């Protein structure tokens, strides 16, 4: 097996590009992840998350740039059993039981975890004798997690791991993941559930159009995009223009009968608001990760669209923010 120096980063993307014909799914990605980090990968649909994960697992080669895993090409790291993956399209095909499947997978790794331990970590002890291809979506997702952990990898890569899980199963999943990663494991997971990213990672990486656009702790990312949200009831008269130009305002959103102004200076925004509108039901709140994410990934749209509908969420944003 390859000897790895402990200071070698677990993941290194260097100017990685992946093109599918005319589509540039990953566009010059630079990203380094060290041992023991728990990293959430965020991005809108089509941002390039799964493609980046595919490059990381050696499922695809980059069109340009390079990807290294534990200091070696991904294919080699996967062969050495250093990485376990839970991908979106996992489907157990054989007639094997859950235990047989996990035992089989564990047997292909040089230093696997004991099968009973894997089954317990994944919450599968009760289902060990059931056929793996006859499980519910949420149960199959747990089998996929067990398969990812079976080889006791240094790095776990999870592509939207909780997509098929209900609220309880999701909580149980993250508790299991923490038990596993508390042993010093590195984990990279993609998700659309921002609160999961907030609670289960110590670093958040946001990609957009195949490029890294933010990288830091949840608190750091919230800080970079403004500190607050000023909201008020959508007035019955047409919304005045110029809300985007009030002091501090980063973006304007109209949804569910409320107008939400993301702002870098709540006091200045509230002070100036009466110039344009008499706000009813005024609230001032700290920006959450969702606000930060929307600010980072909403591309500039026609600001006049902000007043067009109270039902569909509409976001306008100052250019260059
Ligand atoms: N095999 C492929 N052939 C052609 N285009 C592809 C292929 N795989 C991905 N793409 C395109 O690359 C872009 C990035 O896709 P990717 O699946 O990486 O995004 P994602 O961030 O994982 O999205 P989602 O959150 O919807 O899963 C999209 O425009 C997608 O249509």
Image: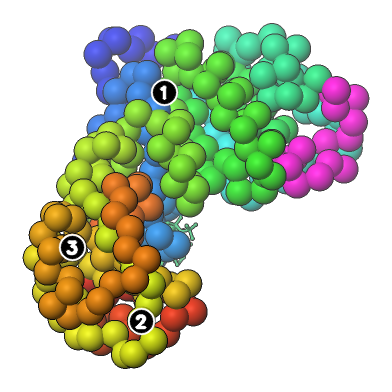
Left or right position of 144 against 245: right
Can I make out residue 27 in this image?
Answer: no
Residue 34, percent across and down?
A: 29, 23
**Which class describes the residues within 10 Å of circle 2: few (<14), some (14-19), or many (20+)?**
some
Residue 130 painted magenta = yes
For discs 3 and 1, the disc positioned in front in the rendered view:
3
Q: Which residue is mark 1?
A: 186
Residue 302 or residue 72, whichever sits in front = 302
Q: Disc 2, disc 1: CB below 8 Å?
A: no
Q: Which residue is mark 2?
A: 235
Q: Which residue is mark 3?
A: 270
Q: Earlier in the sequence, mark 2 or mark 1?
A: 1
Q: Quadrant of the C terminus?
A: bottom left
Can I make out residue 114 in this image?
Answer: yes
Residue 127 or residue 66, whichever sits in front = 127
Residue at image coords 35%, 10%:
3
Q: Quadrant of the N terminus?
A: top left
Q: Could you say whether the residue bearing mark 3 is in a helix, strand or loop?
A: helix
Q: Which residues are magenta?
A: 126-141
Where does ligand 1 appear, by image quarter? Answer: bottom left
Q: Earlier in the sequence, mark 3 or mark 2?
A: 2
Residue 220, percent across and down?
A: 22, 38
- Residue 316 bears which disc, if any? none
Residue at image coords 21%, 49%:
227
């Amino acid at each position: 097996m390859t000897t790895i120096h402990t200071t070698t980063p677990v993941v290194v993307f260097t100017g990685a590009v992946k093109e599918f014909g005319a589509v540039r799914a990953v566009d010059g990605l630079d990203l380094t992840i060290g041992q023991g980090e728990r990293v959430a990968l965020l991005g809108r649909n089509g941002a390039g998350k799964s493609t980046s994960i595919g490059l990381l697992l050696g499922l695809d080669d980059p069109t340009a740039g390079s990807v290294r895993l534990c200091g070696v090409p991904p294919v080699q790291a996967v062969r050495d059993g250093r990485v376990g993956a839970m991908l979106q399209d996992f489907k157990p095909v054989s007639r094997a039981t859950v235990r047989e499947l996990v035992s089989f997978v564990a047997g292909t790794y040089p230093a696997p975890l004991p099968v009973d331990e894997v089954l317990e970590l994944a919450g599968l002890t009760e289902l060990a004798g059931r056929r793996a291809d006859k499980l519910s979506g949420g149960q199959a997702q747990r089998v996929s997690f067990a398969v990812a952990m079976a080889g006791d990898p240094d790095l776990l890569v999870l592509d939207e791991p909780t997509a098929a899980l209900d609220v309880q199963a999701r909580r149980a999943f993250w508790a299991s993941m923490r038990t596993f990663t508390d042993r010093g494991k590195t984990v990279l997971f993609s998700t659309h559930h921002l609160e999961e990213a907030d609670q289960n990672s110590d670093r958040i990486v946001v990609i957009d159009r195949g490029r890294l656009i933010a990288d830091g702790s949840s608190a750091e990312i919230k800080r970079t995009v403004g500190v607050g949200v000023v909201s008020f009831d959508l007035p019955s008269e047409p919304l005045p223009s110029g809300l985007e130009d009030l002091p501090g305002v980063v973006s304007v959103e109209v949804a569910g009968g409320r107008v939400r102004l993301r702002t870098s200076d709540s006091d200045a925004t509230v002070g100036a608001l009466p110039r344009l509108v008499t706000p009813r039901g005024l609230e001032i709140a700290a920006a959450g990760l969702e606000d930060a994410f929307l600010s980072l990934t909403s591309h500039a749209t026609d600001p006049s669209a902000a007043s067009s509908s109270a039902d569909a969420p509409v976001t306008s944003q100052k250019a260059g923010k």
